Amino acid sequence: MEEGDECGAKTSMATLEAFNRCVLHLGRLARERGASQFIADGLQAFSQLVPFASAWWGEMSASDANVPPKSWMHGRINLPESFAAEWSKGAGSDRFSHDTLSQPGEVVRDSGFTDPNEEVDAFARRHDLYHLMCITFELPESGLMFFVCLYRGIHAPAFNDSEAGLFSAFCDHLLQLWRFQVQDMIRFDTGNGATDFGVARMDGSLLYVGARLCAAIGRELPGWSGSMLPFEVIAQLSKAPCVMRLGRCALTLSPNAEHVILSLETQPRGAVLAPRERTAAMLFAAGHSYKEIAKILALSPATVRTYLRNCYVQLGVKSKVELGSVLRSPTAPAVAIKCSGPGISN
């Protein structure tokens, strides 16, 4: 073996070992840190392998001829809180964003302040986004796209082919573990769709959101820009578990450790379930046990059992699967609303 080949082989092996350690660390983070800081901590660990100056990630709706792309949930490293709002002003003209959204699963790179749109170019200069590397993934369960974008400044080297390969492989692991975390929290088979679910921290910042929930909030509370829940919803988080009305929909808020799970159901005319009965039924259909529901709702297991028995009788169902199907049906029975606040009916 030539000396150069041997050196290259050693470098490749060292890179592989470093990547393996990074992925193993990512798995530990998924178990130890929970969803709140998982992506941020995971990317910080990856920066030891592929250095970057700043990062942005989240869920985004794809653009079309009439509607620009929009970030509905996002996180960031070394970028200001206003970053997403600033980006949204020129999102429709952002060539790089359009390129990444049109090539899901592919790493897209660019260098230079070269966007033909002056507003987009000024945005990149303002935040020193000289070298960019991004990947997007389709999220069929949410109806949105998941993206991760890394940035380097003008005085740093461009992202190379080797770094792009490592980034792609790492993001495959990052996305899978994040999806598992979300699925575990909402207790729902995300393979069958979770467009009407959301996961939020107690301060109202979103960790996951589905397209149908986004559309309902945007329709009923105009001006909502995503990432943070509207103040009308944030005001109810500390009251979870409860149900609040959102136009003709019911939004069920269920506590889950330091998070709140949001679930949207259509509100047709018809029979009315008591709020606690419906909340208990939703939690049971989502996979919680009698004891877990009793703890969440501050009830006895016997009371939970009574609530669920009443729901089974009223809805005419005979199994947990049928219960979940009926509750999520557009013709599901309505619920008496018990949350209060601006824009929310009592």
Image: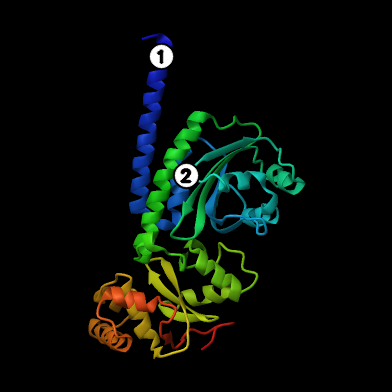
Q: Residue at image x 58%, y 37%?
A: 109
Query: Residue 234 versus residue 329: which sits nearer the camera?
Result: 329
Query: Residue 19 versus residue 137: which sits nearer the camera?
Result: 137
Disc 2 crowd rating (10 Å Cα; few below 14, some 14-19, many 20+) is many
> In the orientation shown, which residue stands out farthest toward the top?
2
Residue 5: numbered disc: 1
Q: Position of residue 17 (x, y in %)?
A: 35, 30
In this picture, residue 145 sits left or right of residue 30: right
Q: Position of residue 266 (x, y in %)?
A: 47, 78
Q: Residue at image x 40%, y 90%?
A: 271
Q: Is residue 80 visible?
A: yes
Tell me if residue 155 comes above or below residue 27 in the rendering. above
Q: CA distance from mark 1 to mark 2?
A: 31 Å
Question: Which circle's residue, 1 or 2, is located before the other in the chain?
Answer: 1
Q: Position of residue 136 (x, y in %)?
A: 51, 47
Tell me if residue 86 comes above or below residue 272 in the rendering. above
Disc 1 crowd rating (10 Å Cα; few below 14, some 14-19, many 20+) is few
Residue 43: numbered disc: 2
Q: Is residue 284 visible?
A: no
> In the orientation shown, which residue stands out farthest toward the right?
118
Q: Amino acid at mark 1?
A: Asp
